[in-house]
Amino acid sequence: MAEPSTVDTSGKRIWGFNPNVFFLGIVSMLTDVSTELIFTLVPLFLANVLKAPFTAIGLVGGLSESADPIFRLFSGWLSDKIGKRKPLTVLGYGISTLAKPFMYLASNWGMVLVIRFSERIGKGMRTSPRDALIADSVSAEERGRSFGFHRALDTSGSVLGLTIAAIIIYLLQGGELQLSLKTYQWLVVAGVVPAVLSVLVLVTLVHEKERSPSPIDSSGSRLSLNKPTTGFSPRFKLFLAILAVFTLGNSSDFFVILRAQNLGAPLIHIVLMLVLFNITYAVTSLPAGILSDRLGRRWVIAMGWSIYALVYLGFAAASSLWQVWVLFAGYGIYYGMEKGVARAFVADLVPVERRGTAYGLYHGIVSLTLLPASLLAGWLWQTIGPPAPFYLGAGLAFLAMLGLLALRE
């Protein structure tokens, strides 16, 4: 498959990476500092401060993550049609930044749902064009490495954001078990600043080489949502189907956080567990990307899903706090093995001129499946018990791993 004309392997490099890859990593890092401060503890804000039922928490977690599939598909398709990725990426980051300060005023779970929904619309608008811009900027030989680097910087922002959160919580609450309203409002205030900085970096330092609009859209025809996969290979479609099976058991990470509290972890411990999770995620991402360039994406993703299945079994069976620490570290390894490599795998499977649309479909499948997954997890937690959603997730991950290994080269 020919590489796009946007790839420049001879120009200036920063730490050995294409400048767009580097600065988009900085943008994601700053955004994640903000997101971790404001949104990571939302399940505890809902449960501890707003006293929301677990079914409502599952709805907020699932719907907020599933709010953006149409925007991911539309923005990816539109970036293919107009031949530009950056404007849609800027728009998406801008929408998310505008939504975040309103969490300071949230007083019921319905308001949280609306604000989180709005923020995720911004994420939906930016994600597919941004991933396509990264793929457009590098050759196939460094694709896994570049996505791994981007994931590593993104997750380094999570580490920094959660570290700041831990400091704020320690200063305001010490070792208390539950989150307070005052503490959460301070987290929101601290999280707005890096969100604004991320948009400034994106606007000033990321530069997109001129591209030709996709030839498939030269007639000016409108997007057909009824046939979004036209022109894609059977292998790509099978990968999306397998991904849907996996995601059906991969409910919102709200439940991982709630499981830690359910097993007796104080608030400050939960934040530090999340720091550990993100450190292992960041440390694993770049080596996993490099490994996928050499070994193949499919095998690395399968290894990540295997680790996920074991970790979810662990969350189901855990009975001691030290076990939760180990599981959070293992959960970070899964993220590092899978997240960047799966994005690179999408670029491997589709034509260059359809990358934006392909990323829209990839992210859309994940988002759409996450809503029923989270609703089901909330129902299982409330009616059967906290271990139930984790047993389901482990079983579906194992099935998806077998399906991925059976996918032909």
Image (cartoon, rainbow, N blue to C red):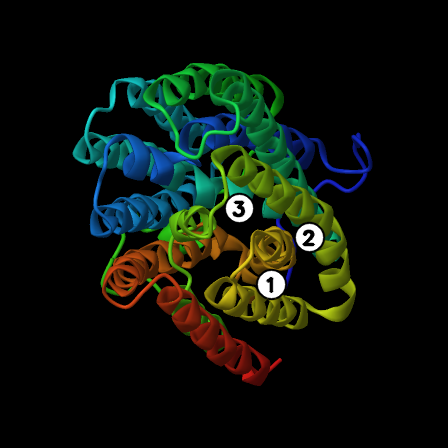
Please state, as top left, top right, bottom left or bottom right, where the N terminus lies in the image. bottom right
| In front of the other: 115 or 332 | 332
Residue beneath the point at 42% across and 72% down: 391
Return the x and y of residue 43 as percentages of the image width and height: 35, 40
Please state, as top left, top right, bottom left or bottom right, where the C terminus lies in the image. bottom right
Q: Tag 3: Cα neighbours inside 10 Å, few (<14), some, or many (≥20)? A: many
Residue beneath the point at 76% across and 61% down: 291
C-alpha distance separating marks 2 and 1: 9 Å
For mark 1, what is the residue? Answer: 348
| In front of the other: 135 or 274 | 274
C-alpha distance separating marks 3 and 1: 12 Å
Res 268 visible? yes
For mark 3, what is the residue? Answer: 132
- Mark with earlier residue (2, 3): 3
- Mark with earlier residue (2, 1): 2
Q: Is mark 2 in CB contact (under 8 Å) with mark 1? A: yes
| Amino acid at dot 3 | Ala
Residue beneath the point at 56% across and 31% down: 162
Is residue 168 shown above or below 267?
A: above
For mark 2, what is the residue? Answer: 143
Return the x and y of residue 66 as percentages of the image width and height: 30, 50
| Amino acid at dot 2 | Arg
- Mark with earlier residue (3, 1): 3
Is residue 81 shown above or below 289?
A: above
| In front of the other: 205 or 343 | 343
Q: Tag 2: Cα neighbours inside 10 Å, few (<14), some, or many (≥20)? A: many
Task: Say what secondary structure mark 1 lies in.
Answer: helix
